[in-house]
Image (cartoon, coloured by chain):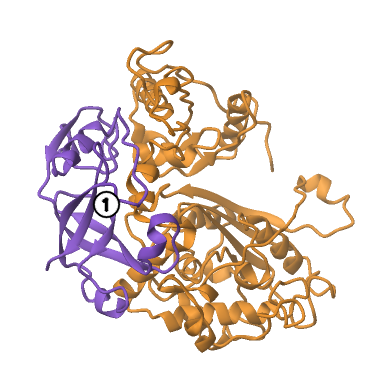
Chain colours: A purple, B orange
Amino acid sequence: MPDYNKPIPIPDPFVSKPYWDGAKEGKLKLPRCTACSRVHFYPRIVCPNCGSRSIEWIEATGEGYLHTFAVQHRASGGWAEEAPFVTAYIDLREGDRVFTVLRGVDPAQPEEIMKKIGALCRIEWDKASDDVSVPYWRVVG
Amino acid sequence: MPSNPSKAAAIVAAAEADEIGYLSNPKTDMMLGIEAIHNVCREAGITTKDIEGIANPGGANSYAEYLGIVPKWVDTTQVGGCSFQIHVAHMLAAVNAGMLDIGVVVNGQAGYSRRSFPRGAAGGPGGDALGPDAQFMTPYGVMGAPSQYSHALTRHMHQWGSTKEDFAEIAVSTRKWAMLNPRAVMHSKETNPNGGPISVDDVLNSRIISWPLNILDCCLVTDHGGAVIVASAAAAKSFRTPPVWIAGAGEAIGHATMLEMKDYTATSAAASGGRAYKMAGMGPEDMEMAMIYDSFTVTVGITAEMLGLTKRGEGPSLFAGGAAGPGGSGIPINTNGGGLSFNHSGMYGMQLLVEAYRQLSRTAEDGINGLPGKQVDAETCIVNGTGGSLSATGTLVLTVD
């Protein structure tokens, strides 16, 4: 924990509380609309698909697929020493998309990572503080 | 002809958040505003999906994204407490002009709840420490626009088979225009050590910022001031300077954060451009030049596709072999040298307007803002600005008699 030197998000204690509570237990919790059954991310108090305000939380598989990525050569703070590193958007198995730093790929070979677009990825959690765990994703497929 | 907007629109419903006052359970600005929108829609008997236009001081992008709507009219005028009266006035004019039928003016402001926000959390719509960016994007080390736009270029290459070389042609073409503009930062070695001609290889070998974007794929960061005068048709006749007619105008929001961009190779310019063409009674085939926001090469390539100037996936092809450059075989694009090589002050839309006016009014070769070879013979120009993270777009179709 003391060695986590990246920016630690401030959990929104209102709308996203179930997400961050789940994160502490290493579980990916996602908001799902009870009216249209669609999962959305980032968490909201209204479904961006149908406009309903009836939202429940489900535990997700923690699996998804690489949608696109970039290799960051310029960064600040704790990330500066990691550069170059790979950021990516992951299409969740349950629907919608998350952003992350991608593991299990070589930042020096972006053309090889291009071949992994669509590949299966799995979530893993870094304990950033007593209260906050931050999700990362790893290419496994 | 313009008509009197009096009674062209009415306020048809009004509502507030679920709870207001001193809330025992704190809420954010966004929660309060969303509750109010939800409630006013229920009162009016519509859904949020019926909303065509959205106004909020500074936060229209975030409200639209949160609701999952893609408005065709936006107003983020932020002039303090009277902003909302002004939003209503703008909306009246827009309704009168036929740009929308149903719009909402919204605000949420956690003046009291803010006191109990976690340390470091600000609470404004969108940009706050409890918002989606701060919680789900910035912890991963992304730094500014290039670190996000790069993901769009990767996806374009994957989805459409384009290459970094294709997009580098955009930077090369735009630099050629800058070399005809003495006020362009990259006009020559005299204006900047890195100025003067560049090749595709120069772009590919320049420093990597956020792969696949190299530094020569990225816009400059400069100072700029600009202004344009808009006058009625009647008033325009009394000016000594020639009129450039606003034949069409359209606007749209696709999303606010790139997390919510459905297709990274498509922007709302397809919608805003479509509206502008429709208003003008013209199409892409009628455009004789284009001024396209070039924060990055990828921005131009994608936008050209959205505006119908070429097929999907083939945006960079407009620039191949210098076709969009000085004396090229295609339509001239970004004749001032662009944000890439002329000037980009952060919000580059003003530079687009100034250059479009100069070209269509035949004042593009005045020796200060242009040298011989810069003036093109276009009588129509499509102008497209892109804001945020490929988020919002505004398109104009400009013409001369």
- State whether residue A33 is above or below residue B148: above
> In the shown orientation, is residue B286 left or right of residue B119?
right
According to the picture, the residue beneath numbered tag 1 turns out to be A98
- State whether residue A44 is above or below residue B393: above
The x and y percentages for residue B280 are: 59, 56
- At 52% from the left and 82% from the top, the residue drawn is B203
Q: Quadrant of residue B119?
A: top left
> Within 10 angstroms of label 1, few (less than 14), some, or many (20 or more) residues?
many
Q: Quadrant of residue B180?
A: bottom right
Q: Quadrant of residue B158?
A: bottom left
> In the shown orientation, is residue A16 left or right of residue B153?
left
> In the shown orientation, is residue B152 left or right of residue B252?
left
- At 52% from the left and 73% from the top, the residue drawn is B215
Q: Which residue is at the front of the view, A36 or B95?
A: A36
The x and y percentages for residue B218 are: 53, 69
Q: Which residue is at the front of the view, A59 or B11?
A: A59
Residue B21 in sight here: yes
- At 68% from the left and 31% from the top, the residue drawn is B4
The x and y percentages for residue B174 are: 61, 77
Number of labels in the image equals: 1
- At 75% from the left and 75% from the top, the residue drawn is B181
Question: Given the image, what chain letter belongs to the residue carrying mark 1?
Answer: A
Q: Which residue is at the front of the view, B154 or A137?
A: A137
Q: Amino acid at mark 1?
A: Val
Quadrant that contains the N terminus of chain B = top right
Quadrant that contains the C terminus of chain B = bottom right
The x and y percentages for residue B232 are: 76, 45
Q: Which residue is at the front of the view, B315 or B193?
A: B193
Which secondary structure lies at badge 1? strand
Residue B265 in sight here: no
